[in-house]
Structures are given as structure tokens and as C-alpha cells.
Amino acid sequence: MPRLRVPSLTLQCRDDAVAPLEVGRWMHARMPADTLLEMSATGHCPHVSAAPETIAAIRAFLD
């Protein structure tokens, strides 16, 4: 992961039983070009449970 130089976006749900906050923070700390967004969404599939928040996050990152 430290060699990944491509800008990336890590979307981390605040209440995720599969991947808790520490997982997103761990990934972010190891990817030099990463942007970490801790979403207010819950669950492991924010594209399903919080589609508008996910879409807004991706659009903001791409802009």
C-alpha cells in the first residue's frame, strides 16, 4: 500500500460491523495519496444504505 501513488478515496462508515473506523484509518495511514472520509452512514455498503452521501463524497473527490 505505501507504493500506491494514485489519488484514492477511502469511504469509511462510522458504524460498520465488518470494517470498524480503525480499518479505514489504517488504510489511510499507509496510502500516501489517500483521502479518508468518515461518513455518517452506517453499515458496510454505503452505496446501498446511504447512496446520496456516497455520491456526494465521490463527486467532491473527483472535482
Image (spheres, rainbow, N blue to C red):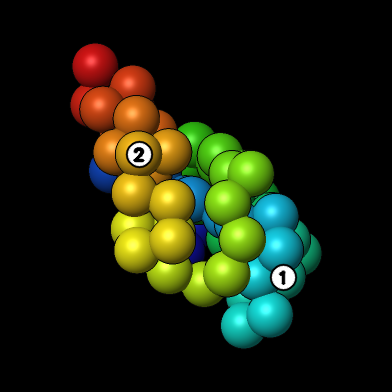
Foreground residue, 21 or 55?
55
User: Residue at coordinates 57% horizontally, 69% vertically from top-left?
Assistant: 43
Which corner quadrant of the image does residue 37 belong to?
A: top right
Q: Amino acid at mark 2?
A: Pro
Q: Secondary structure at mark 2?
A: helix
| Depth check, front residue: 1 or 12 | 12
Q: Residue at horizontal 71%, vertical 63%?
A: 15
Q: Is residue 38 left or right of residue 5?
A: right
Q: Which residue is mark 1?
A: 20
Question: At x 34% / y 58%, what residue is drawn?
Answer: 47
60 or 48, nearer to the observer:
48
Inspect the image, locate mark 1, and give the three-letter code of the amino acid beneath it. Pro
Vertical placement of 18 versus 34: above or below?
Answer: below
Residue 5 x, y percent position in the rendering:
34, 44
- Disc with the residue nearer the chain's start (1 vs 2): 1
> Horizontally, is 1 left or right of 42 in the view?
left
Q: Residue at x 72, y 70 (%)?
A: 20
Q: What label sits on residue 52 in the rendered view?
A: 2
Residue furthest bottom in the image: 18
Residue 7 visible within the image:
no
Height in image: 31 above or below 36?
Answer: below
Report whether 28 appears left or right of 56: right
Query: How far apart, in angstroms, are the residues tagged by discs 1 and 2?
Result: 21 Å
Q: Relative to 50, does residue 15 appear above or below in the rendering?
A: below
Residue 17, position in %: x, y? 68, 80
**How far from the left and from the top, in percent, is residue 21?**
73, 61
**Quadrant of res 39:** top right
Of residues 5 and 36, which is closer to you in this image? 36
User: For the C terminus, which image quadrant?
Assistant: top left
Circle 1: is it few (<14), some (14-19), or many (20+) Cα within 10 Å? some
